[in-house]
Image (cartoon, rainbow, N blue to C red):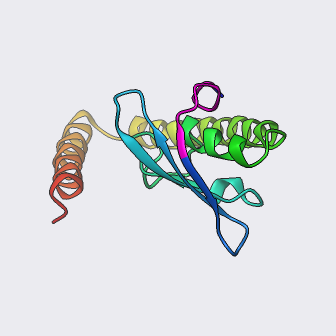
Amino acid sequence: MEYYKQNKVSSCTANDDGTYEGVVSGSSDESYSVHVDMEHPRKSTCNCPLANCKKVICKHIVAVSLCVDVSEAECFKNEKTLYASEEEERRTKKYYKYMSYAKCMSQRELREAYVELMIELEEIRLKEKYGK
C-alpha cells in the first residue's frame, strides 16, 4: 500500500478486457511494468525481480490495483496470503518426500546426487542469465 500512498504509480490505464496496465517507480528509481487482472489476481504480472515470471503479487501490483479500486486491496492481500500459505505447504511436502528418499540412499549415492544437482543448478542459472 505504501507505493500507492507515495504516488509511485506513474500511469494506470484500462484495457478493453477489463485488465489494467500500469507503470510503478521502484525503490531504486527503476520503473516496473505492471499488468493487473482484478478478476483473477494471480494472473497479474510485474517485471520486478520479485514477481517476474512468478505468480507473486508484489507491491507494484498492489499499487496499481489500488489506483483502480481501493476496496480491491483487501482481495489482493487475501490472495497473497493464501498463495504464501499454499506455497509453504507445497514446500514442506516436497521436503519430506525428498528427505524420505535421501534416507534410503548410501553416502556415495547422496554425494553423487548432490554433485549432479549442483551441476544442473549451475546450468539452469547460466541459461537464465544468458538465455541459452
At x 20% / y 43%, what residue is drawn? 118
Residue 85 at x, y = what percent?
A: 69, 35
Residue range in magenta is 2-10
State how many labels appear. Answer: 0
Is residue 9 part of the magenta span, yes or no? Answer: yes
Pick the residue in front: 131 or 11.
11
Q: Quadrant of residue 87?
A: top right
Q: Residue furthest right?
A: 71
Q: Quadrant of the C terminus?
A: bottom left
Is residue 44 positioned above or below 82 on the image?
A: below
Task: Describe residue 39's horizontal placement relative to residue 127 as left or right.
Answer: right
At x 61% / y 35%, what residue is drawn? 88
Task: Describe residue 90's horizontal placement relative to residue 117 as left or right.
Answer: right
Residue 113 at x, y = what percent?
A: 24, 45
Pick the residue in front: 89 or 80.
80
Residue 101 at x, y = what percent?
A: 44, 43
Is residue 17 part of the magenta span, yes or no? Answer: no
Q: Quadrant of the N terminus?
A: top right
Task: Describe residue 55's horizontal placement relative to residue 89 as left or right.
Answer: left
At x 68% / y 39%, what residue is drawn? 80
Q: Quadrant of residue 61?
A: top right
Q: Residue furthest bottom?
A: 16
Pick the residue in front: 14 or 80.
14
At x 80% / y 44%, what residue is drawn? 72
